[in-house]
Amino acid sequence: MEQNVPYAMIDGFGPPEGFKTGWHVTRDKIALRYMSWGEDVARARAGQCRGTLVLTHGRTEFIEKYYEVIDELLSRGFAVFTFDWRGQGLSWRPLEDRFKGHVRDFGEHVEDMREMLAEHVTPNFPGPYFSMSHSMGGHANLRIAHDLPDAFEAMVFSAPMWGIQLGRGVVLALTLAVARLNLMLGRAEAYVLGGAEQGIADEPFEGNKVTNDPGRFHRCMDLLRALPELGLGAPTYGFFDVSMKSMGMASQADYLAAVKTPLLVVCGAQEQIVDNTQIAQMMPHLSNGELVVVPEAQHEILMEKDAARAAFWSAFDAFMTDR
C-alpha cells in the first residue's frame, strides 16, 4: 500500500534517489511504515544487483537515521528494504503516550518480518536475501534466524541486544527487584525508573553512550526536530520484562545450536549498552557465527567516526564476498 507516506529529511541529508514508501497493514490490523530501493536502483548505482538486504533498526531508531547506510548498501549492489518496527518510528505505537517504548511480545517482530518477506520482499525484490540489524533489531533477528531458518542466506548484526548491561551484584539485584515490584503492581505500561517522558532530540552529545562522532549524533537530533513524531523515550517495565525473558530464551545453548544461517556479529570495544561479554559467550554455540570487535566504537557502530565505520564495512565486505 503506497500512498503519501511521511518521512523526514534535513539539509544535505535525505533518502537516496529511487526510493518507494508504503504502509503495511499487519495481521492484527496495525500499520508499519516501510521504504525500499529496488533492483533497478542497485544496478544503476553499482552496475549489478547482488540480491536484497532487509535492514532493521535498534530501539528508538527509525528509517531516516539510516539514509547514509542505505546509500552504502546500494553502492555495493544490494537492493534494500527497510521498515520501522511496531512501537517506533512512524509505525503504530501501542500506548496512548507514543513516547513510551513498549512491546507486548518479541514474537510479534518475528511475525512482522514473516509478513514483510511474504508480501513485499520475495514477490518484488530479487534474491538471494540478506539481513542487517542493529541492537534491539539484532535480538529480533536472532529469533528470526531460529524461527525462520530459510528466510536469509546470511545475516549481519551490529551490537545486537543479546544481553544488556544492568550492573553486577547489588545493583543488578536491585534493578530486577524494582522491575518485579512494578510488574506485580500492574505498572507494565509505566516508564522504567528514571525514564524520560519525551523523545531524544534534546540529548547532549557529551557523555552519550552511542557514538564518538558529534556530526552523526547531531544529524540524528536534527532529524528528530524535523519530524518529532519519530522520537521515542524510555522503555516501560513491560518492555524490560519481555526483553529479559526473550533474551534469556535465545541465549540458551540448544536454541543457538539450532541457528544454522551464517552470521557476522560486529561489536564496539567501547560498548556501554549491550553486554559484549554475553555476546562472546553465545558465539561458540553458533556454528556459522563470526565475531568482529571494532576498537574505537561505542554502541552505534554505523553512526561512528569514519575509521570505525570503515572497520565495519571491511568486515561486511569480507563476509559477503561470493554470497
Image (tube, rainbow, N blue to C red):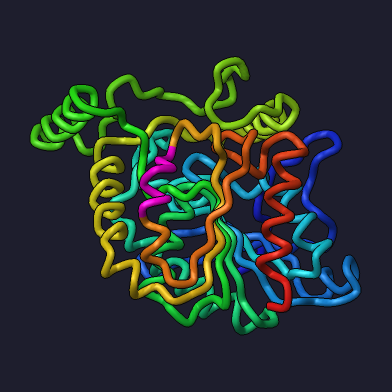
Task: Residue 192: give x, y in percent of width and height.
Answer: 29, 28
Query: Is 99 contained in the magenta span?
Result: no
Residue 171 visible in the picture: yes
How many badges with numbers are in the image? Answer: 0
Query: Is 280 contained in the magenta span?
Result: yes
Using residue 61 as the reference point, say whether residue 81 is left or right of it. Answer: right
Task: Residue 103: give x, y in percent of width and height.
Answer: 33, 49
Q: Quadrant of the N terminus?
A: bottom right
Which residues lie in the magenta part?
274-281
Above or below, 299 relative to 46:
above
Residue 23 visible in the picture: no
Task: Residue 21: give x, y in percent of width and height.
Answer: 68, 61
In the foreground, 124 or 154: 154
Is the magenta region chiefly helix, strand or loop? helix
Q: Residue at x 42, y 37 (%)?
A: 98
Using residue 34 as the reference point, say whether residue 180 is left or right of it. Answer: left
Task: Residue 308: give x, y in percent of width and height.
Answer: 70, 40
